[in-house]
């Protein structure tokens, strides 16, 4: 068959759901198996339903701090030995922390899966931390913050915007933590977090690759099954954001800023279990307003028609347990003030709300999203991450598998309804970012 014809058929056909099998161990640990036989490899991931947004007041950064400390010693392994063994078996490993989860993963040959479970189960229950480990790793995370945030003015801007956006919700604190609180984290903070939240009934095991579901279940029962559930695991409580009644504005001035810009962040609903349609419409809205410099509303009007801007963009962050954000950014052309750039952005948005979605643009975006969903199936690690993140953020396996078709069913009316709901200046934070106020 001709390649183009094959692609057209693929885009027209319904999305094929992955082969996914789920179990729950007696101790409450969820197990998700994604079969992919294309290579004799496997991705093994353990996701904990706890992240920086679950941290107690005054201990920001403890979730990420413990992530680092999990590579120290256990009762049976020396500090650093975990990654050494993974590498010796031809694999790779790492971990990451987000607002809603903390995850650990290894990619290895399929016949090494049992060894990965053995080691991961060991550090779930037998972590050993010395005061020296804690002191050393505290310096590491402080240096990480210095490099990624303090030395990056745009990262500082994002941090300040989130702090202004979320007055009451813990999404307003940085995942890595506030520097002054990170400096006070100690062994008791780390072990208290570990003892309470790193338990099988707060974890999801995701295994993707060349495996049989029954084999994975047997290995999971062998290695994770004996670990007792945490009987004191608290309900996952999140403080709610109060209604925002007025636009919030800030000016960030930093001589390291090479190009002034204006950015606006709106509160926006997240993907909810069984109700993902609004989130899908917001994915389209981001593409319509700022996805392509050549065809998006902001791109065509501000960069080409009026040449007010050098760059425009839009983005939607809806993969959260709680409300996310929808953002717009405009970098003005030389000689254009930030006020002029913001006025042009607002005029373009107002015009879009009056005129609606261009039908040709809508179908082009629909095809692009369809292609992206198909290509995503080629990466087994991405598949594992997709399910792990979703399940820690209250979605279900069915929600994940329904998502591609929900995206394809979005209409112009859906997009306009989502735009009317989200694009409210009283629900936004607008920031001007400049090297000097004299250049505003």
Image: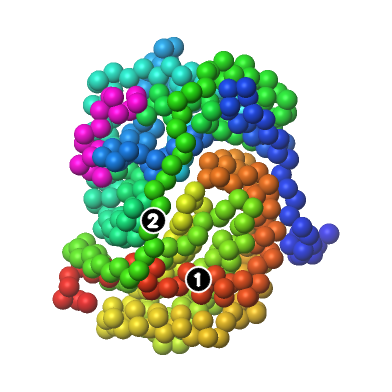
Upstream in sequence: badge 2 or badge 1: 2
Left or right of residue 247, residue 237 in this image: right
Q: Is residue 344 above or below residue 40?
A: below
Q: Residues within 10 Å of mark 1 (few under 14, many from 20)?
A: few
The x, y position of residue 408, in whole percent, is: 68, 64
Write the residue at 57% across / 42% down: 391
SS type, badge 1: helix
Magenta-colored span: 178-192
**Visible residue check, residue 99:** no
Residue that label 1 marks: 421
The x, y position of residue 245, in whole percent, is: 35, 69
Write the residue at 41% across / 87% down: 306
Q: Residues within 10 Å of mark 2 (few under 14, many from 20)?
A: some
Left or right of residue 152, residue 291 in this image: right
User: Within the magenta stretch, is there residue 142?
Assistant: no
Asked where in the image residue 156 lies, by quadrant, the reply is: bottom left
Are the residues flagged by discs 2 and 1 in contact, CB closer than 8 Å?
no
Residue that label 2 marks: 241
Asked where in the image residue 143 lies, by quadrant, the reply is: top left
């Amino acid at each position: 068959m001709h390649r183009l014809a094959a692609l057209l058929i693929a885009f027209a056909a319904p999305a094929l759901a992955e082969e996914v099998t789920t179990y729950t161990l007696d101790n409450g640990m969820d197990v998700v198996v994604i079969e992919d036989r294309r290579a004799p490899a496997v991705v093994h991931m353990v996701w904990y339903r706890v992240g920086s947004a679950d941290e107690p007041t005054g201990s920001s950064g403890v979730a990420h701090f413990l992530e680092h400390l999990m590579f120290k010693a256990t009762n049976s392994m020396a500090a650093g030995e975990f990654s050494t063994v993974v590498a010796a078996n031809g694999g790779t490993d790492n971990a990451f922390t987000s607002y809603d989860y903390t995850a650990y993963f290894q990619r290895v040959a399929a016949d090494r899966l049992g060894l990965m479970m053995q080691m991961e189960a060991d550090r779930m229950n037998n972590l050993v931390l010395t005061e020296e480990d804690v002191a050393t790793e505290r310096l590491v995370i402080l240096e990480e913050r210095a490099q990624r945030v303090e030395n990056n003015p745009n990262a500082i801007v994002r941090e300040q915007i989130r702090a202004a956006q979320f007055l009451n919700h813990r999404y307003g604190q940085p995942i890595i933590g506030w520097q002054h609180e990170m400096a006070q984290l100690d062994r008791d903070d780390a072990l208290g977090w570990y003892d309470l939240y790193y338990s099988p009934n707060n974890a999801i095991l995701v295994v993707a690759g060349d495996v049989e579901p029954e084999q994975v279940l047997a290995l999971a029962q062998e290695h994770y099954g004996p670990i007792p559930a945490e009987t004191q695991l608290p309900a996952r409580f999140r403080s709610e954001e109060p209604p925002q009644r007025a636009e919030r504005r800030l000016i960030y001035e930093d001589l390291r800023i090479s190009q002034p810009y204006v950015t606006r962040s709106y509160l926006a609903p997240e993907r909810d279990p069984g109700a993902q349609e609004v989130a899908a419409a917001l994915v389209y809205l981001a593409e319509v307003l700022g996805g392509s410099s050549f065809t998006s509303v902001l791109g065509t009007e501000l960069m080409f028609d009026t040449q007010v801007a050098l760059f425009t963009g839009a983005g939607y962050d809806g993969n959260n347990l709680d409300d996310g954000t929808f953002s717009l950014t405009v970098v003005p052309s030389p000689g254009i003030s930030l006020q002029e750039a913001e006025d042009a952005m607002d005029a373009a948005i107002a015009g879009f709300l009056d005129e609606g979605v261009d039908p040709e643009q809508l179908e082009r975006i629909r095809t692009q999203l369809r292609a992206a969903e198909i290509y995503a199936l080629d990466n087994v690690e991405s598949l594992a991450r997709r399910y792990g993140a979703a399940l820690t953020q209250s979605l279900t396996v069915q929600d994940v598998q329904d998502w591609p078709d929900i995206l394809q069913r979005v209409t112009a009316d859906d997009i306009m309804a989502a735009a009317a709901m989200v694009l409210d200046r009283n629900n936004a934070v607008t920031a001007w970012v400049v090297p000097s106020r004299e250049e505003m």
